[in-house]
Image (spheres, rainbow, N blue to C red):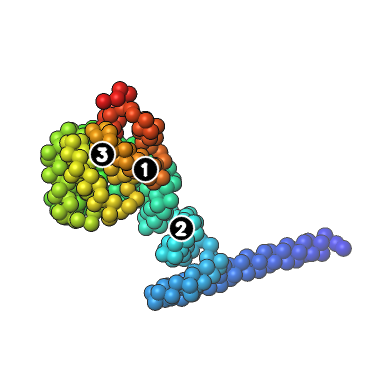
Amino acid sequence: MNARTKHIVRLVGFCSVAATLVTASGCRTITSRVKSYQATRHLARGEQHLASEDLDAALVEFEAAVKADPKLADAHSNMGDIYRRMGEIGKAIESFRNAVNADPLSFKDTFSLARLYHFTRRLKDAVEVYLAAIDLDPSDYDAQLGLGVCYQQMDEASLAVERFHRAIDADPDRPYAYVNLGVALDAQEKHYEAIAAYQAALERDNHQPHVLVNMAHTYMNQNRLKIARATLSQAVDMDPSFAPAHEGLGYCLFRMKDYDHAADAYVDALSIDSRLPKSHVGLGSINMIHHIKDKSRAELREVAIEHWHRALELDPDQPLVRNLIDKYRTPGADPYNALLGVQDDVAP
C-alpha cells in the first residue's frame, strides 16, 4: 500500500468515528427531548387532576413526570403539596427538598420546606431554610414571623424580637407578630414593652382572649393582681369556652388568697378541658390549705394529693409538685408558699 492509499484509509477511519460520535450525540439529544416532552405532558395531566381534587391520579402523573425529568421543579412542588395534604409529612419534606434543589430561586418551595421542618420541630433546619426564604423575599411577613417563632421556641428571645419587628415592618396591620413580640419581650422581663405589644395586637383585632390571658400574666409578673384579674375576667366574658382564661383567673385569685373563687375558676377550666395540669396543681394546693386550717378534715389532704398526682400524670416534669406530694404525705410546709416556689419546711 503506497503512502497515498494509507492516507486515504486514515481519513475514511476518522470520518467513520466522527460520524459515530455525531450519531450518538444526536440520539442523546433526541432522547432528552422526548423525555422532556413526556415529563411536560405528565405534569399537565397531573395539574388537571389536581384542579379536580383527584389527588391520587395527580400523584401518579407527577411521579411519572419526575421519573422522566428529575429536575422538573413544578412536579416535585406539586407532589409536596399533595403529600402535605395527605398528612405524609416525611414525603412532603423530601418532595419540597427536591423542588428547592431543582429551583433554588423558588420562594414558595423554600418557604414550604421551612414550615414543614418547623412543624416537625426540626428547628435548626427550619431556621436555615427560613433564612434562605427571606434571602429570596425579605419583605415576606409569614417567613419573618415563622423564623421569629422558631427562635422563640429555641429560647433565643433577642433574635425572636428582631424578626417580629421585621414582620411588623412588612405588614403592620396584622396582629400575630405583635402577640409573639409581647411573649418574647415578657421573657426578657421587658414587661411594659410586652404590654404595649399586646395592646397593639388588640387594636388590630379586639377579639383575642388568648392575648388578654398573656397580658394578664405579664401584669401578674409585675404583681399587679387587680388589673390582671380584671383582664382575665374580660377574657372569660369574651369566650367562656376558653379554658386558659379560667385557669389564669384561678391562679390570679389564688395569689390574691381568694381560695374559694380560685377553686371555682379551676373547676370551670377543667370542665372545659380535663387535661390542664396547672388547674390540678391549684386545686390540690387549695384543698391542702383548707385541710391545714381545719385538720379534722383529713379527706381534703387526700383530695389535694390526688390532684397533684393527676397533674404529674399530665406533665411529669414538675419537680415542685413531686416535692409537694412528698411533704404533705405528712404535715410539712405551707402549700401556698410551696406552690409559688418559696422554700419553707416549717409547719404552720
- The reply to whether residue 179 is in sight is no
Left or right of 308: which side holds 92?
right
Circle 2: element type: helix
Question: Going 25% across and 47% down the picture, which residue do you hit?
Answer: 266
- In the displayed structure, 84 sits above or below 156; it is below
Circle 3: element type: helix
Q: Nearer the viewer, mark 2 or mark 1?
A: 1
The answer to whether mark 3 and mark 1 are in CB contact below 8 A is no
Which of the labelled discs sits on residue 89, or is there none?
2
The answer to whether mark 2 and mark 3 are in CB contact below 8 A is no
Q: Which residue is mark 3?
A: 286
State the separation of the CA atoms marked 2 and 3.
44 Å
Q: Nearer the viewer, mark 2 or mark 3?
A: 3
Q: Position of residue 322 (x, y in %)?
A: 39, 35
Left or right of 87: which side holds 16?
right
Residue furthest out toward the front: 296
Q: Amino acid at mark 1?
A: Glu
